[in-house]
Amino acid sequence: MRLILLGPPGAGKGTQAQKIAREYGLYHLSTGDVLREALEAGTELGRQAKAYIDKGELVPDEVVIGLVKEKLGTPEVSATGFLLDGFPRTLAQAKALDALLEELDQELDAVVNLEVQPLTIVDRLAKRRVCKQCKASFHLEFNPPIVAGVCDYCGGELYQRSDDQEETILRRLNVYQQQTEPLITYYAQQDLVINIDGERSVDEVSRLIGEQLAELTNKHDCA
Ligand code: AP5
Ligand code: MG
C-alpha cells in the first residue's frame, strides 16, 4: 500500500502513522522526524532546516523533495510500500511526488485526511511529549505514557518539541491553512481522499482508519 496521512499540526498523523505502518509493514516516512534528526546530528540538512522549524515555517520545497526522493527511490521501499506523514505539504511537493511515482511506475492508494478543529490542536500540542528514540507521541492527559517521562514502546526518554510553544503552534496552523489545506482538493479530484474524524479518541480514530483501509484492501483483492 502507498498512503499519505494529511492533516493539520497535532491532528494525530504521527500517532496513527506508527500504528498503521506497524500493522501493514509499511515504510513510515515523517519528513518532520527526518529534519529533526538531522538538526540533532548537526548535519547540513539540519542546519538548513533549523530556522524554518523554529519559526513554524515550511522548509523550502527543493530540500524536502530531495530527501523524499532519496528515501522512496530504494528497492526496499518499493517492496514494502510506504506511509507519508507530513509530506506533501505544498502543491509543488504533491506534483513532485506524482512525478517520482510515475518514474517508479507506482500509484498512490489513498490519502487519509485527519479532520481536527484549531482549538483541539493547541490543546494537544501544548501537552505533547515525544520519544527521543522511536519518536512515538504521547499526551500528558489524553494519551499518557505508563511511566512518566518514559516511552511505552522502547523505554526512550520523552521530551517537548521546541516548536510546541503556543505562538509557533498558531503560526504552523496558519501555514497549514494557507499552503497544505489546498491539497485536500488536489487529491479529492483524483478520488483518493478518505476523511476521518480526528477529534475522536486515539483508539477510535485507529478503528475508523482500519475499517477504511480494510475496505481498500478488499477492493484491491477483488480487482
Ligand atoms: P511535523 O513534524 O510534520 O509537524 P506537524 O505537521 O506540525 O505535525 P505534528 O507532528 O506536530 O502533529 P501530528 O499530526 O504528527 O500529531 P501527533 O500524532 O504527534 O513538521 C514540523 C516542522 O518540520 C514543520 O513546521 C516544517 O518546518 C518542517 N517540515 C516537515 N515536513 C515538511 C515538508 N513536507 N515541507 C516543508 N517543511 C516540512 O499528536 C499530537 C498530540 O496529540 C500528541 O500529544 C498525541 O498524543 C495527541 N493525540 C493524537 N491523537 C489524539 C486523539 N485522537 N485524541 C487525543 N489526543 C491525541
Ligand atoms: Mg508528527
Image: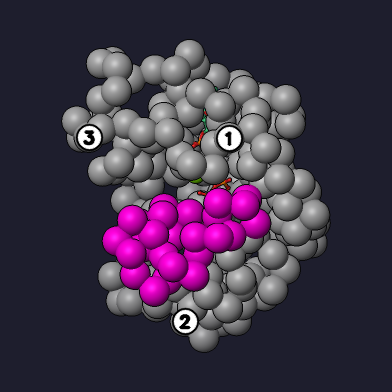
Q: Quadrant of residue 180?
A: bottom right
Secondary element at image label 2: loop
Q: CA distance from mark 3 to mark 2?
A: 36 Å
Q: Position of residue 155 (x, y in %)?
A: 19, 30
For the residue pair 172 and 177, the one nearer the viewer reads as 172
Q: Which residue is mark 2?
A: 104
Mark 1 vs mark 2, foreground winner is 1
Is 20 displayed left or right of 121 in the figure? left
Q: Position of residue 103 (x, y in %)?
A: 52, 86
Up the image or down, 2 lies above or below 127; here it is: below
Question: For ligand 1, which image quadrant applies?
Answer: top right
**First of labels 3, 2 by sequence position:** 2
Task: Mark 2: give few (<14), some (14-19) or many (20+) Cα within 10 Å.
Answer: few
Up the image or down, 178 lies above or below 173; here it is: below
Residue 35 falls within the magenta-colored stretch? yes
Q: Is mark 1 within 8 Å of ligand 1?
A: no
**Residue at far bottom of view:** 103
Residue 106 visible in rendering: no
Q: Residue at x 80, y 54 (%)?
A: 178
Q: Which residue is mark 3?
A: 156
For the residue pair 135 and 17, the one nearer the viewer reads as 135
In the image, which disc is placed on residue 165? Answer: 1
Secondary element at image label 3: loop
Q: Quadrant of residue 38?
A: bottom left
Q: Residue at x 53, y 80 (%)?
A: 100
Is 157 displayed left or right of 130 in the figure? left
